[in-house]
Amino acid sequence: MAAPPGGSSAVPSLPPPSPKSPPRYPDLYGKRREMAKVQMLEREIGFLEVGFQFGKLLLIIVVSNC
């Protein structure tokens, strides 16, 4: 049995496949890297605070000796 003239075959044509984006996985490496940066900055802030307190103490001692 042949297809009618000017008609299409019995199987409908499907649209061409389109590329799919990759699944949304959490960025664990990026998150860990950011957390490490935050921890480093917090540690640095702590060192600066201790140094500032020590500097204030030295200033008080110097001023009281004058």
Image (spheres, rainbow, N blue to C red):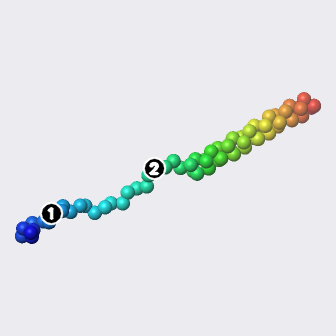
- Above-or-below relation of 28 to 48: below
- Above-or-below relation of 46 to 14: above
Q: Nearer the viewer, residue 37 or 47?
A: 37
- Mark 1 → mark 2, Cα distance in angstroms: 39 Å
Q: Residue at x 80, y 34 (%)?
A: 53
Give the farthest residue toward the right: 65
Q: Which residue is mark 1?
A: 10
Q: Which residue is mark 2?
A: 24
Q: Earlier in the sequence, mark 1 or mark 2?
A: 1
Classify mark 1: residues with Cα within 10 Å, few (<14), some (14-19) or many (20+).
Answer: few
Q: Give the number of the mark in front: 1 or 2.
A: 1
Q: Residue at x 9, y 69 (%)?
A: 1
Give the farthest residue toward the front: 1
**In this rendering, would 32 be left or right of 8?**
right
Which secondary structure lies at badge 2?
loop
Classify mark 2: residues with Cα within 10 Å, few (<14), some (14-19) or many (20+).
Answer: few
CB within 8 Å, label 1 to label 2: no
